Amino acid sequence: MTSLLKEISPIKLAFGGASISGEGRGYGFGDISEDQSIALLKYAFDRGIKIYDTAPIYGFRASEQRIGRAFRHNRDQVFIVSKCGVSWHDNLRVNMSNHPQIVTRMLETTLKDLSSSYVDLYLIHWPDKNVDVRFTMEVLSKAKREGKINHIGLCNTTLEEIKKASEVEKIEVLQSELNLFNRKVIHELFQEIKQNERSFMSFGTLDKGILTGRAHAGRKYDESDLRGHAPWWKKSNLEFKFQKYEKLKTVRDEYQLSGIDLAIGHNLMYDEVDQVIVGARSQQQLDEAISSTQKLVPVAAILKAISIIDDE
């Protein structure tokens, strides 16, 4: 049996919709106009990318709306992934809740913003300690029976959440952070993924640009870029990561690899990874990412990189 995403796309690269949040702010990575975003999405499609990952919080709906407009006339040729559970108040303060009423409302808004009667894959964005995931799953199961959702998955999840959610409906896809700096999911979920033939998508593949060298200590960010203002970004051990990226230059030089080659090569080294989510804000960045998915990065290079990062 082949997992879902292996059947959907032979290219192991999914377009990360947070990169086109633009002036909508929310969870996003800087200004990019609607026209630029739509042109980039269409270029991605022409390059063979079929899977597009988004969420309402990306640009406070802007990302979903732009994806909807880009593929309005060829909706059946793309596979759109969106999420529920992270909404916001009128003052734009984030609200994280998987309450059935909130999830129901979020799904309807997502369908409207995508200009679509269905979403291909719908994920619960984060676990909610105040809401039993089975109650949330009842809402998604009903929506699936109604044709509003084709497939259901979990993001940022745990083994316990997977077990409970699976009591209600089949969980086909898991999505979690995975990169050279954060490899926890390998030990926490990969055995479960393999045993139950689930698909897995990695986000944070480039660690928000750190593993490409584009995010560095001296860089300034515009107001639409979370890296310029988010408290959790400033507390995310940046100095350590910037220093380690510089030390990885010895590996990149020895094997003639770019930062993105090494980052994507690391994730694709694991058979459990069906798709790496990568955000792009230009055709050049997208071309680089596609090229990296097609490059066979030596395992020896990846192991040396891991050793450098783990060496304290």
Image: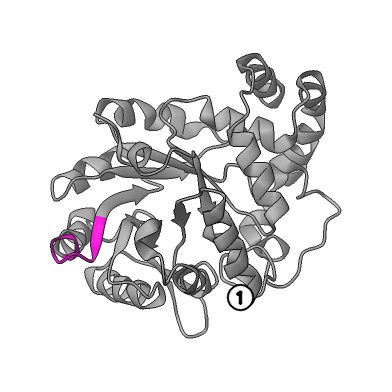
The residue that appears at 63% across and 28% down in the rendered structure is: 295
Q: Residue 46 in the image: state x and y as whole percent.
A: 55, 54
Q: Residue 299 in the image: state x and y as whole percent.
A: 61, 17
Amino acid type, callout 1:
Glu
Q: Nearer the viewer, residue 294 or 254?
A: 294
Q: Residue 78 in the image: state x and y as whole percent.
A: 40, 57
Question: Is residue 148 inside the magenta stretch?
Answer: yes
The residue that appears at 52% across and 84% down in the rendered structure is: 91
Q: How is the image coloured?
A: one colour
Q: Which residue is mark 1?
A: 34
Number of numbered markers:
1
Provide the secondary structure element on which disc 1 rests.
helix
Q: Nearer the viewer, residue 72 or 299?
A: 72
Question: Is residue 61 inside the magenta stretch?
Answer: no
* Image quarter hosting the C terminus: top right
Indicate left or right for 184 with 199 as reference: right
Please identify the quarter of the rendering in which residue 271 is found.
top left
